[in-house]
Structure formats: C-alpha cells, structure tokens
Amino acid sequence: MKTSYLSQSLVAALIVGASSAALAKMYCVGDADSFEEGTNGMPAACYKAVQDDSGAVTSAVWFASEGDASELVGADAGNTGYGNDRPMIGTTTDRVLELNTGGGCLTRRVSGGGMNCHAGTVYIDMLVQFVPFDEPPVISQSLAKLAVYLNAQSNLVVYHGGLFVTSTVTDVTLDPASWHRLTVNAFDTLYGIPCGKVYIDGMLVTSSASYLSLWSEPGAVGYLFPFTTEDGSIQAVGFEGRGRVDELRVTDNDLYKYSPMLLVFNDAHLDVLFAGQVLQPGDTVDNGAEISIRTDGWHAFSVTGNCGCVEYSGPVGERVSSSTGLVTAGHAANVVISTSLLTGVTLGTNVVDEVLLASWAQANGKSADDVESSGNDWLDDYLLNVAPDTDASIMISSIAYNASAGTATITVSASSPAVRFDQLNGTLTVYTCSDLKGGWGEPVGNYQVSLADTGEATVVVPVSAGPFIKVAVK
C-alpha cells in the first residue's frame, strides 16, 4: 500500500503504498481487526459499523474520505502463506483489507478515546503488502506523527521528526509482491519526546538518520525515530494509497514478547470471559490478557498449563466462584482450567451424597452457601427432590394384608404433586413392628420405585415382625 501512518487524530502515519470462520476464535487486548467478520466487497468504512433499524450508522471505527474505494477481499496466497509469527496467531485468514484511498486517507479510530505513549508503550502491529510510491507522498505534518512507506526503489522510508521533519530512506528493501509484518512501538523518552521503533518481520529498522540514544545526534546507526510533535496521543491509524492490510492491532500488550495462549476447559461447570464476551473451549487470548472465571457455585477451579511458566493472577480456592486475573507465560502455552466438585458441603447435621446434593441445589438455583445456611430446614425437600420450602410429606394411603404370605401391599402417596417417587434423592424405607412401645427397629426393606409408580408408590413388604408399618425417605 502507499502509506500507513499514525496521526494526531492518529498517532503516526504508517504509509503503506500503492500497490469460513473457524469454530475457535482469538480474543485480543486492545483494538484488533482481522476482517473476518465482514464480507468480500464490503466497503472499509462499513466494517464493524453499527446501524439502527432505519439503517443509519450509530457507531463506526473505520472512516473513509470521499472517493475511497477500499474494500474487503479474499486473502491471497502471499498472506495465508506468510511464514513468520503473525499479529493474530490462530485467527482465520479468509479476508483482508484492500486499500484504494483515492488520494484521501482511510483511518481506523483507536477505541476508548485513543492511547497515549507518554503513559506507556503503544504497539501498532499489522500484516501489510506494500505498493511503492512512484513519487514521494505528500504527508500532512498536522496529522501524521510517524509514517512508513516504500519508495519507487522499494526502500522502506520512515517519515519522522527530530531536528526537523524529514523522510528517511532506509537500507531495508522489500518485495512488493510479498506480505510483511510491520510493527511500530511508540513510547515516551526521558525528555518527554515520543519516539517510534519500527520493525519489519520482527527485525528492528535502523538508520544513520535516526537516534541511537536520548542524547545522541543522528549519524551513528540508530533506531529511534522521533515523532513530528511532542504530543504522544494516538487516536487513530491511517492509510493512504493502495495495498493490502490484515490483522491490524493497536494495544498496550507487547505482541513480540508474548505469544497467544490456548484456553483448555470444560464449560459444563464454569464460564470464561474476556471483555464481557463468553469464550468457548479452544479459543485463544493474548498472553497477558485479563480473563474472568465464573463457576456454577458448586465447583472449585484451578488454573495450570502445559508448562510450569503458566500463571494466573486471580484468586482461586475451594469456595471461589468468581475470579478475574491475568494469564501469562514465557512463551505460547495452553492455559488449563480444571474444575472439581466442592467437598465438605453439609445439609445441617445430615450426611448426604455430595453429587446428588449439588445436582438438586443447582436445579433449584441454590449455591453451596445457600444450602449450608439452611441447616436442616431443606432436608426433606432434598430427599423428596422438590424445591426448597415445598414442605411436602409422604403417607401410607392404603394397606392390604396377605396373612398366608406374611406380607402387606402398601400404597404410599405424597402431599404435593411435585414429589416423583421415581426421582427421589433418598430411598423409600419401610419399617414394621408388633408393638409401638418397643420401637421400630431395623427397616424391613429399602425400595426403588419404578417409573410407572411416579404419582404414588406401591410395594409389598414382609410383616413377620408385626402388623404396624411405617414408611420414610432416608
């Protein structure tokens, strides 16, 4: 492309000259455009634009000058075959932005009112296919703070400030037919002068016209290109001319120092979020990204990785159900988020099955803390598998004795239609005795109720211990 730059409404000008979505996604810190959400032929200014019901644009991040014909197109083999590290590793590569600005400037606004390199390094990163300028472009000093383009000889040229505003022709030559990774690190200096370091495919661009240190004069082979102004605000990135762009990023995260991190988790018991967006297993985030982990309230979680350098800065623990922190590692890595059922949850003074208790509580929207605070009050509701505070009970509604067989056929019903005898958390238990004063003793049987008897339960019990019968759910 002809020119790519960041200006005052942008930070510097990066002049790049004339010339099926995957299931898993990559989520990036800062602004990131892979152009995959658009469609082929979509005008650049429509990408990520939001419209109301009438079709009026209510918000946009790309802005085009009159006569701009830049649009989204299918990626070519030079992009998909780019062999070095990419700004958005793991993203799909089906679509790129083809520039045709028609003498104007196409700008990408930086979200949040922009960034300021006086407050910390700002990283502008992208894949580009440069088209050389036949003649040096006319760059507006009132807008552009730094610009990069190719001249007619395919030399990389950096437009910058210093003792005076100039365009420095570097010894770097690029093949216009190939894609390259262009990175600008914009940062403050000790004397408050914002500078940019320019990288091509990860290699630092140097020049005798740039500065080696804060106090040196041009002449030695340096790498600091001062901005054309002391204003370090970066509000947009602009493009002029023709060419192609993909995987554009503006962030405060060092994309060369860190590599993306693959999230490995089972979303049955927790959600993982980035910037409010619920992520899916297999999605990728930046190294250094802030994520939030929300459990179902019945599972503890831990964060590990496929190597020992993976770290998570947020709180974890047996009863931590909500946590936010940074995921970091020394290199590309897998972040493994594991869950385990909470242990030691009590229902008053009763010992119950922890798995069944968790299932019942979750089905009724109750947390472990809710269950423990209820004490014994919810025991019957849990055993009968009904909602808390239903206060249902069971009773023997009929008894038929068979003296010769020494058995009785009993029918057990419930005071609430919510009780299903085939879905009890407890077990239907029957006791018999010959003398109520002597107590019930050990149960004569524990019974599982079939699906056909969900409304009431009919069971045959031995009455050799006596004719008195009691039922309970234990």
Image: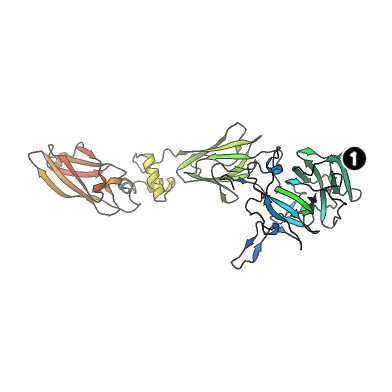
Task: Pick whichever, 464 or 249, lies toward us.
Answer: 249
Write the residue at 80% across / 43% down: 198
Whole-percent x, y for residue 59 in the image: 66, 61
Task: Pick whichever, 461 or 98, lies toward us.
Answer: 98
Residue found farthest to the bottom: 54
Label 1 sits on what residue type? Ser
Task: Pick whichever, 457 or 167, lies toward us.
Answer: 167
Residue found farthest to the left: 404
Task: Pick whichever, 104 or 292, lies toward us.
Answer: 104
Horizontal side, residue 19 vs residue 348: left or right? right
Q: Quadrant of residue 9?
A: bottom right
Question: Crowdedness of circle 1 by 10 Å Cα count: few (<14), some, many (20+)?
Answer: some
Horizontal side, residue 404 vs residue 432: left or right? left
Task: State the scheme by which the image is colored.
Answer: rainbow
- The residue under label 1 is 208
Whole-percent x, y for residue 279 in the image: 56, 47
Which quadrant is home to the C terminus? top left
Q: How many marks?
A: 1
Helix, strand or loop at label 1? It is loop
Residue found farthest to the top: 308
Residue 121 visible in the shown view: no
Residue 280 visible in the shown view: yes
Q: Quadrant of residue 177?
A: top right
Horizontal side, residue 178 vs residue 213: left or right? left
Whole-percent x, y for residue 174 in the image: 81, 41
Whole-percent x, y for residue 209 in the image: 90, 43
* Picture layout, residue 140 above or below residue 78: below
